[in-house]
Amino acid sequence: MTTRAEFNAEEWDVITDGPAIAGMITVTAEGGGTIRESITMGKVYNQAREAHLGPQLILELLETNPAIGQDEFSSVESLRVEGLQKLAEAIRLLEEKAEPDEVDAYRGFVMGIAERVAHAHKTGGFLGFGGHEVSDKERAALEDIRVTIGAHEVPDAE
């Protein structure tokens, strides 16, 4: 069982920021986020905390708020490029120090955040009719995240 104590403060920040970065990449895929998507990200964290699911490492991750500031990334493109690099770094750190099931649980949580955010807001359509639950840009962001963290492809629910 791996715990937070296995990581120094800088490493832990990288790990705890990963899920929020994945959510932010997804939120900004359409050129900007909505309040609904941001609220969804917070709800996923709260639901995961309440459910107490996963290994101890994930529970400790949920107890630590991400330390991402609004000024950490200079643009949406910077967020995508540097954010994916940070996600890759988080996975590298976890693969070095954590058990394989803990790394998989982290991957699942990161993808869960990104997918829930992508499904939080329909794009296109008019007055709530028609449109797409997940846009092509959001799908591309999800795929970039999935490939970066080495998550298994999940069949599309649509």
Image (cartoon, rainbow, N blue to C red):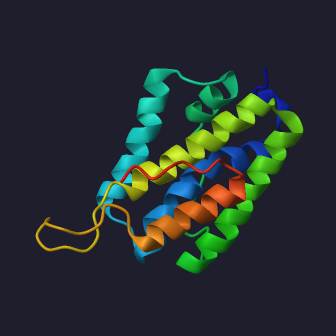
Give 33 or 26, whichever is nearer the viewer: 26
Residue drawn at point x = 68 percent, y = 59 percent: 147
Image quadrant assignment for residue 74: bottom right
> Is 55 left, or right, of 34 in this rendering?
right
Residue drawn at point x = 54 percent, y = 48 percent: 154
Task: Residue 98 in the image: state x and y as whole percent.
Answer: 81, 32
Task: Residue 133 in the image: state x and y as whole percent.
Answer: 31, 61
Residue drawn at point x = 80 percent, y = 41 percent: 94
Q: Is residue 49 visible?
A: yes
Position above or below: 20 against 98: below
> Is 76 left, or right, of 100 in this rendering?
left
Task: Residue 24 in the image: state x and y as whole percent.
Answer: 50, 61
Image quadrant assignment for residue 84: bottom right
Task: Residue 15 in the image: state x and y as whole percent.
Answer: 70, 45
Task: State which quarter of the image contains the N terminus.
Answer: top right
Give 151 or 14, whichever is nearer the viewer: 151
Residue drawn at point x = 49 percent, y = 47 percent: 113
> Is 72 left, or right, of 100 in this rendering?
left
> Is 113 left, or right, of 144 in this rendering?
left
